[in-house]
Amino acid sequence: MNEEKVKDLLREKGLKVTSQRLMVLNILSAHGDEHLTVEEIYDLAKEESPEIGLATIYRTVQVLLELHVIEKVTFDDGFARYELNGEETGSGHRHHHAICTQCGKVYSLETDLLDTLEKQVFESLGFEVTDHEVKLYGLCSACRRKAQNAMEVKT
Amino acid sequence: MNEEKVKDLLREKGLKVTSQRLMVLNILSAHGDEHLTVEEIYDLAKEESPEIGLATIYRTVQVLLELHVIEKVTFDDGFARYELNGEETGSGHRHHHAICTQCGKVYSLETDLLDTLEKQVFESLGFEVTDHEVKLYGLCSACRRKAQNAMEVKT
DNA sequence: GTAGCTGCAAAGTTTTTGCAGAAGC
DNA sequence: GCTTCTGCAAAAACTTTGCAGCTAC
């Protein structure tokens, strides 16, 4: 993520460029695929500046959300998670996620194959899709292998 | 939703069939497409039996989730929402949702067009998809019309 | 210098837990 | 009758807010 771009976005809105805001940005940038919770961001931030407050992380995340620099994702586990917006891909669309129901690991996908679905929704409902989020649930290759081995042992 | 089926599921697990559990089930059944929050279920339940407790709703919802009778959905607004599982459709798959970013209204979709995507994910990641959830964000027809009118007034 | 920001602590929400009495089986 | 469930209240978990001092510009 381009730090300068975010600085410009902040200044455009009359907001200030602070070390805390850049830190949160860099943490999310460094942990691209991990969908961090606020608590996790906080812990990572404390490693760099132990005096930072949890409320600052909540407020920073709010600001970055409003600038569309980051996105909120929820995996139905009660935690709000944040990740950098995939603006660099040009689509401005969210990632998709494949969530393993066994180990809980989350994989990010870049594919964007929903055009047919979106077209159909527009025609039937008059609903104009501007963004979408897809979650696939299932077994990752590691867990699938484990499950297969377990089956073979039994037989 | 077949009440008898749920009663059987409860008994199979050594759980008890109580009026509260049936009430929550019936409320979700009667409000099929509304993705109710716990608080909303609670308010509806109180209309019938004012002495019911909020904790009971939370616990009942947990039980019904474990029986896969209902499903949890989150629209990133901080509320957990619940809806009956679409078992009757035979697919066992979740609904998809179209969420209007203007008015917040949620439409349920039954279309199931992700086969191509799922196949591709299996081939590239070895991830075996068993279920999926799609959220489309955009403008519903009403809000789109409003937006268009506003544009016309300006010009 | 003036805005807006931060850290702390206190308050708000949403959800969970403990326990005595009630209900299902 | 024994187990599980419910309702209440208290607690826990997550998030927001108020305020005095600090920082960006």
Image (tube, coloured by chain):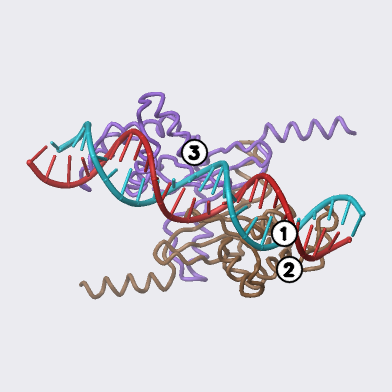
Chain colours: A purple, B brown, C red, D cyan
Q: Are marks 2 and 3 on the same chain?
A: no
Instruction: Please name the amino acid that badge 3 sits on.
Output: His
- Quarter occupied by residue A155: top right
Does residue A140 appear in the picture of this structure? Answer: yes
Chain of the residue on which disc 3 is drawn: A
Q: Counting residues from the N terminus, which is met first, the one under dot 1 or under dot 2? A: 2
C7, above or below B26, in the image:
above
Q: Are marks 3 and 1 on the same chain?
A: no
Label 1: few (<14), some (14–19) or many (≥20) C-alpha neighbours in 10 Å: some
Chain of the residue on which disc 1 is drawn: B
Q: Is residue B99 left or right of residue B83?
A: left
Instruction: Please name the amino acid that badge 1 sits on.
Output: Val
User: Mark 1 sits on what residue?
Assistant: B69
A35, above or below C19, in the image:
above
| Badge 1 vs badge 2, beta-carbon distance below 8 Å | yes
- Quarter occupied by residue B122: top right
